[in-house]
Amino acid sequence: MKVAITTRGYKAPERLKTYINEKMKRLDRFSDRIMEVEAILSYERLDQVVEFKLRLNNKRIIVKEKSEDVFKSIDLAVDNLERQITKVKEKYKEHNKKKIVEMVD
């Protein structure tokens, strides 16, 4: 999986980059179809905003979270990504089940 980190308005410290990379490795448990992830870090007034754009084989998932702490924003966004990846994975399973049943009948 390829991870690209973009910051708007500041330069991200190395500690933040390694934290994002560790969190992205955690997503491999949920799906092996993740092609690339783009992380965009920025400010909105006093809040730190984190946006992840994740590309699966044929699906894009975009998550945006904001809070007063960038690490908290990353954690919230990764939790949201995990839920959405699981949801997409379940849809694939259900879709494949229906096709097999229709073919047997």
Image (spheres, rainbow, N blue to C red):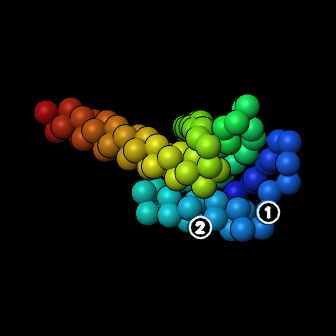
Q: Where on the picture, by quarter, is residue 90?
A: top left
Q: Position of residue 1 (x, y in %)?
A: 63, 60
Is residue 50 left or right of 59 when viewed as pictured? right
- Mark 2: few, some, or many residues within 10 Å (few <14, many ≥20)? few
Q: Secondary structure at mark 1?
A: loop
Above or below, comparing residue 78 to residue 42 in the picture: below
- What element does badge 2 sit on? helix
**Residue 60 image point, x, y percent:** 58, 37
Foreground of the two, 37 or 18: 18
Is the Cβ of the residue at disc 2 closer than 8 Å to that at disc 1?
no
Three-letter amino acid code at disc 2? Glu
Q: Residues within 10 Å of mark 1 (few under 14, many from 20)?
A: few
- Gap in Å between the C-alphas at discs 2 and 1? 15 Å
Residue at 13%, 33% (x, y): give it: 105
Q: How many marks?
A: 2
The percent position of residue 88, horizontal first and vertical second, equals 41, 40
* Above or below for 78 versus 13: above
Question: Which residue lies under the disc numbered 1?
Answer: 13
Tell me which residue sits at (79%, 48%) in the image.
Answer: 6
Check residue 22 in the rendering and tell me which mark sits there, or answer none.
Answer: 2
Residue 17's place in the image compared with 46, above or below, is below
Q: Quadrant of residue 15?
A: bottom right
Direction from residue 14 to residue 61 in the image, left or right: left
Q: Nearer the viewer, residue 51 or 11?
A: 11
**On screen, 30 above or below 92?**
below
Residue 12 shows in this picture:
yes
Report the side of 45 relative to 19 (left or right). Answer: right
* Amino acid found under the numbered disc labelled 1: Pro
Mark before the other along the chain sequence, 2 or 1: 1
- In this rendering, does residue 92 appear at all? no
Discs 2/1, front: 1
What's the residue at 75%, 54% (across, down)?
4
